[in-house]
């Protein structure tokens, strides 16, 4: 027994001493204006748990957002290319229709082409011009979308850098320019025209209504044919009417009445007329004199309802 205890004591004494725990070196931090600062307590270096489930989920969402961004870029690039092709085709169509109009217009003046055939080519030319204006608008919208993208936050918090939104726009009339005109055209007013009125011509009634409906206050300028009773002995007239409607509807009624009686005009002014929306207001003129790409009043009213 004594020998066993002696053996255990000897073995214990012969074991090497336990080395003290290694201390992390103290941390020094340089602070502007204060110089180095030494911490008495070691600052442990923490390694992030890269395999944490939250991190893996966030990375997956980031990859999905990047994929959606790439998909949006491809979609827009495709649409821009298609719109450019449509614009080129529309421009070629306008050139073709313009040549056809010039040819038939010359024949019409010599009496070799009927009024109906001449009116048809005029309408086709105007349709081609409107399609060109619309195609050009889409091309500009696509160009602005790709050149000046807007940053938005995705539903995952990932900040992307592309969003493409195109609101309906009326050619030749920006929202700021067209709003006063829209307000005026949508205003409900009363109109009364009698056969015994001193001037019941369409243009005479239009001039009177422009004052009563206060076009000047709305800063809306109207240009129209000089075809009132003060100018023409037998001017296109407005049949008796009385009621309440919007200014836009009354203007369309005046246009229809005028077009049904263009044979009363001077020969140089005969033909289908239309009311077009311009930056300054309204232009009441022959279809063949229509400004390039200008929307008609009817188109403008339909656009405003959307």
Image: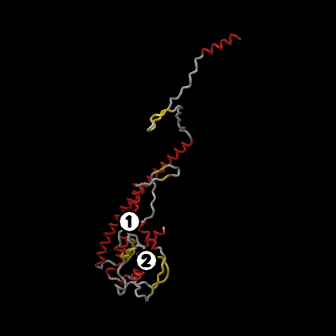
Secondary structure category for the residue under label 1: helix
Dividing the picture into quadrants, the one containing residue 298 is: bottom left
Q: Mark 1: few, some, or many residues within 10 Å (few <14, many ≥20)?
A: many
Q: Which residue in the structure is indicated by mark 2?
A: 214
Which element type, helix, strand or loop, lies under badge 2? loop
Residue in view at x 53 percent, y 36 percent = 47
Q: Based on the displayed image, in which of its 4 quarters is residue 219 positioned?
A: bottom left
Image coordinates of residue 281 in percent, x first then y, are 39, 72
269 sits to left or right of 14? left
Residue name at image x 37 percent, y 73 percent: 123
The answer for how far apart the CA atoms under marks 1 and 2 are is 31 Å
Q: Nearer the viewer, residue 223 or 30?
A: 30
- The disc placed on residue 283 is none
Q: Quadrant of residue 108?
A: bottom left
Q: Quadrant of the N terminus?
A: top right
The answer, for residue 121, to whether it is visible in the render is: no
Earlier residue among tags 1 and 2: 1
Q: Is residue 251 positioned above or below 143 on the image?
A: below
Q: Nearer the viewer, residue 229 or 272?
A: 229
Vertical position of residue 48 compared to residue 78: above or below: above
| Residue picked out by circle 1 | 133
């Amino acid at each position: 027994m004594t020998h066993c205890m002696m053996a255990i004591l000897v073995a214990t004494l012969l074991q090497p001493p336990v080395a003290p725990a290694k201390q992390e070196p103290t941390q020094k931090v340089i602070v502007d204006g204060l110089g180095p600062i030494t911490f008495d307590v070691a600052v442990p270096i923490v390694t992030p748990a890269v395999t944490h489930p939250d991190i893996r989920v966030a990375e997956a969402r980031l990859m999905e957002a990047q994929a959606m961004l790439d998909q949006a870029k491809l979609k827009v690039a495709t649409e821009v290319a298609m719109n450019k092709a449509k614009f080129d085709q529309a421009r070629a169509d306008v050139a073709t229709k313009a040549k056809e109009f010039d040819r038939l217009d010359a024949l019409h003046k010599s009496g070799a082409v009927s009024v109906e055939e001449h009116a048809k080519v005029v309408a086709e030319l105007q349709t081609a011009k409107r399609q060109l204006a619309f195609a050009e608008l889409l091309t500009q919208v696509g160009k602005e979308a790709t050149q000046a993208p807007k940053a938005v936050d995705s539903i995952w918090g990932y900040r992307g850098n592309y969003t493409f939104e195109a609101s309906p726009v009326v050619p030749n009339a920006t929202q700021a320019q067209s709003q006063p005109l829209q307000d005026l055209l949508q205003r409900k007013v009363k109109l009364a025209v009698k056969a015994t009125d001193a001037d019941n011509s369409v243009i005479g009634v239009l001039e009177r209504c422009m004052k009563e409906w206060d076009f000047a206050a709305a800063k809306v300028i109207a240009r129209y044919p000089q075809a009132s009773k003060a100018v023409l002995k037998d001017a296109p007239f407005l049949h008796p009417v009385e009621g309440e409607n919007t200014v836009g509807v009354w203007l369309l009624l005046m246009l229809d009445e005028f077009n049904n009686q263009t044979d009363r005009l001077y020969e140089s002014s005969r033909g289908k007329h239309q009311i077009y929306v311009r930056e300054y207001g309204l232009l009441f003129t022959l279809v063949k004199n229509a400004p390039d790409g200008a929307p008609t009043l009817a188109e403008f009213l339909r656009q405003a309802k959307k």
